Image (tube, rainbow, N blue to C red):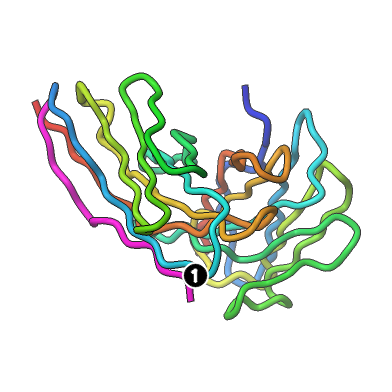
Amino acid sequence: GQNIDQPTEMTATEGAIVQINCTYQTSGFNGLFWYQQHAGEAPTFLSYNVLDGLEEKGRFSSFLSRSKGYSYLLLKELQMKDSASYLCAVRVQAGTALIFGKGTTLSVSS
Amino acid sequence: GAVVSQHPSWVICKSGTSVKIECRSLDFQATTMFWYRQFPKQSLMLMATSNEGSKATYEQGVEKDKFLINHASLTLSTLTVTSAHPEDSSFYICTAPREVNTEAFFGQGTRLTVV
C-alpha cells in the first residue's frame, strides 16, 4: 500500500519559522505536492516538487529528497492566518490522483 | 479565479433521498476528474476516478452503486449519492488536472449533511 506520514499537530508563534516534515513510501513517484486547507474550505495549492532540492515561493519553501522519501514545507515569518491544516500529497503515476497524508494542523499564536 | 467549479457548496437532505453534486472545469477540458471525501479532522480520501466516455474507477471499499459517477462531457462530472444515510455526511470535493503532470485544481467542495 501507499504510506504518507506527517505530524498531526504543530504549534508556533507569530514571526517564527516552522518546518513540517513528510515522509512517503509509495509504489511509484511522479511528484510531491503541498496544500493548505482552512477549516471548512477546499485545499489551496502551495508547492510542487518532482526533482530533488528546494523550491522557494515567497514565505513558503518546499524541499524534496527522493532517495530518502522525504519532503518538508518551510514557513517563514509566520502570521496568524497561517493557522491551518497542511497536506502533503504524492502522485504515484502520471495522470493519477494524488494520495494525501493525514495533514498537519498548525496553530500560530501571538 | 476558480478553474474548477463545484455545486452546490452545501446541501442538507433527508435520509433515503439522493443528492447530485456537479464538478465543472471552467476553461479547460478534463478527460479525468477525481472525487474525494473528507470526514471531520481527517484527510482527503480518494473515492473514484471519473473518466470521460468510460466507466468510473472506484477505490476499494467505495460502493459504486451508492456513489454514481457520470462524466457527461469534457467539462462536467457528477457524483450522485443515492439513498443517502447520516453516515454519508461528509465534505465531498472534486479535482481536475489541467494537463497530465500539473497540479490538480480543486472545486470548492460540497458539505453534505444527511438528517
Q: Is residue B84 magenta?
A: no
Kind of residue sitting beneath label 1: Pro
Q: Is A71 positioned to the left or the right of B13 in the image?
A: left
Circle 1 crowding by C-alpha within 10 Å: few under 14, some 14–19, many from 20: some
According to the picture, the residue beneath numbered tag 1 turns out to be B86
The chain under label 1 reads B
Residue A65 spot, x, y in % from top left: 37, 49
Q: Is A62 positioned to the left or the right of A26 in the image?
A: left
Magenta residues span A1-14
| Residue plotted at (40% across, 50% down) | A88
The answer to which quarter of the image holds residue B92 is: bottom right
Q: Is residue A3 magenta?
A: yes
| Residue plotted at (75% across, 59% down) | B50
Number of callouts? 1
Residue B62 spot, x, y in % from top left: 61, 76
* Vertical comparison of B34 with B98: above or below: below
Residue A42 spot, x, y in % from top left: 49, 41
- Nearer the observer, A109 or A7: A7
- Nearer the observer, B26 or A66: A66
| Residue plotted at (41% across, 67% down) | A25
Indicate the quadrant containing the N terminus of chain B: top left, top right, bottom left or bottom right.
Answer: top right
Q: Is B86 positioned to the left or the right of A81 in the image?
A: right
Residue A91 spot, x, y in % from top left: 56, 55
Q: Mark 1 falls on what kind of element?
A: helix
**One can see residue A80 in this view:** yes
